[in-house]
Image: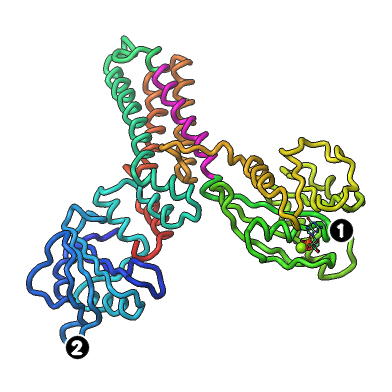
Amino acid sequence: MYSTDDTIVAIATPVGHGGIGIVRLSGPQALDIACSVLHRKKPLQARHATLARAFQSRDSDNSPIDQVLATYFKSPASYTGEDVVEFSAHGSPIVLERIVTAAIDTGARLAEPGEFTLRAFLSGRFDLVQAEAVADLVDAVTPAQARVAFDQLEGTLTTAITELDTDLFDLVSRLEASLDFPEERYHFVSRSTTTAKIQSITERVEALLADGRRNRVLREGRQVVILGKPNTGKSSLFNRLIGVDRAIVTTIAGTTRDLVTETVDLNGIPVRLVDTAGIHPSDNLVEVEGIARSRKAGEVADLLVLVFDRSRPIEQADESLLQETANSRRLFVLNKTDLPSLWPTDRLNAEKGRDVVETSMSKQVGMDQLRTAMVRALGGNELQRDPSSISNVRHLELLKLALKSLNQGAESVAEGVSEEFILADLRGARTALEEITGARAPDDLLHHIFKHFCIGK
Ligand SMILES: Nc1nc2c(ncn2[C@@H]2O[C@H](COP(=O)(O)OP(=O)(O)OP(=O)(O)O)[C@@H](O)[C@H]2O)c(=O)[nH]1
Ligand SMILES: [Mg+2]
């Protein structure tokens, strides 16, 4: 399905104007095509930056497009494992597109999304986990996401999975060999060793899974919705957390009508923060719709931040909000501490500093406590940096499959059934592990993964 015998070309830098823009060529004809674009007879020297001029195709007018730095990476020591030439030109979309056209005129084909990385995978430069890590690294929006992606690119997760698979392979081979001695059963490996080995592999898979659940938070982020009755300071809190005056703040109750959303980095967790309309009984049609939207956003949130105005007596609207959200993960913010308090101190019956944070948005008091409480409530304190971290849903699902097969295998051993049944389970676990690293990678899986890449990567 995937051809690798032609030469592909694409702009590798983002759309728009920049100091430098890069056009990348990869494939068996990369050097020839580059030389023809540069009107050079002498081949480029590998791993040397050569200053040259790039031209329109030979037959048209011979006018130069730009002055470029051309670097040739000879196969297999290149990103794709094939011959690669990179042109660094001035970062104008016009210039870069003309260089691409010149390359296409001399025999290159426009690359599909992710095709450079796909070729790196197909040529064995990296496995599938590393290829996926390239996309994650490019897409990372927080330093923590970038760190996990880079670890995976470096192959730490690959190593962990490969070690598991090697141990399984060893056990499978011994059990297979034992099949030739049906009289003796467990000829090359004892039953107790089989149990112990399955146990040890299972524990390692479980540890990776536990780690993966934590890391999904990093990868996918969390949604936090701010709720409260009108005028309690929700929009002020939202603006403080994102660091700019995004939502309108006024003394008029009912200022915010629609949902306002921004993403912030809270200790490495990408948090989608949603400011909402104040929830309270209303007859105003616009406000009623805004309140309905607030409720809906609250229902799908990972965390609710309930904002109360401590300088006003508790009202029915506060009480019903507390009741309505009783089953959600929530934090209480008692705002306006710069004014005299009209709330009994223990009204919320929650642990102060942990679930209740006292703030003054006008005096900027309590912001650090609020951030810390939010990170804790989102499980951020457990995020660690394990070098073999898993963060990808596809990997997690396959690990779960492997775990299921391992558990079945352990049961089969306990029941004392023949080795053949145990082998079927263990082979099932191996198939799942090999699909993670791509040792077993059907075309439709590759297509699914690489279509999400950007062009030029
Ligand atoms: N004194 C005092 N006033 C505050 C504080 N926080 C917010 N306010 C004021 O309270 C008013 C309402 O603030 P907003 O942030 O618009 O409140 P809101 O909850 O978003 O209001 P709605 O959008 O109408 O639901 C504004 O006049 C703010 O300046 C605070 O900590 N202390
Ligand atoms: Mg508001």
Q: Main secondary structure of the magenta part?
A: helix
Q: Residue at x 20, y 57 (%)?
A: 82
Say left or right for 336 vs 44. right
Residue mark closest to the camera, 2 vs 1: 1
The C terminus appears in which quarter of the rendering? bottom left
Q: At label 1, which amino acid type do we have?
A: His
Looking at marks 2 and 1 on the same chain, the residue that comes earlier in the sequence is marked by 2
Residue at 24 percent across and 69 percent down: it is 87
Tell me the CA gap for discs 2 and 1.
71 Å
Q: Is residue 215 above or below residue 450?
A: above
Kindly check if marks 2 and 1 are in contact, taking CB atoms under 8 A apart as contact.
no
Query: Mark 1 Cα within 10 Å, few/some/many (few <14, many 20+)?
Result: some
Residue farthest bottom in this picture: 61
Looking at the rendered structure, the secondary structure element under dot 2 is loop
| Quadrant the N terminus occupies | bottom left
Q: Is residue 213 magenta?
A: yes
Identify the image's colour scheme: rainbow, by chain, secondary structure or one colour: rainbow
Give the labeled residue for mark 2: 60
- Residue at (48% x, 40% y) in the render: 396
Q: Residue furthest top?
A: 184
- In the picture provided, is 55 more to the left or to the right than 209? left
Rendering coords of residue 354 (x, y %): 71, 38
Q: Nearer the viewer, residue 51 or 322?
A: 51
Q: Does residue 231 belong to the magenta stretch?
A: no
Question: Pointer 1: what residue?
Answer: 280
Residue 177, percent across and down?
27, 20
Distance from mark 2 CB to nearest ligand 2 atom below 8 Å: no
Q: Which contiguous range is marked in magenta?
A: 196-216
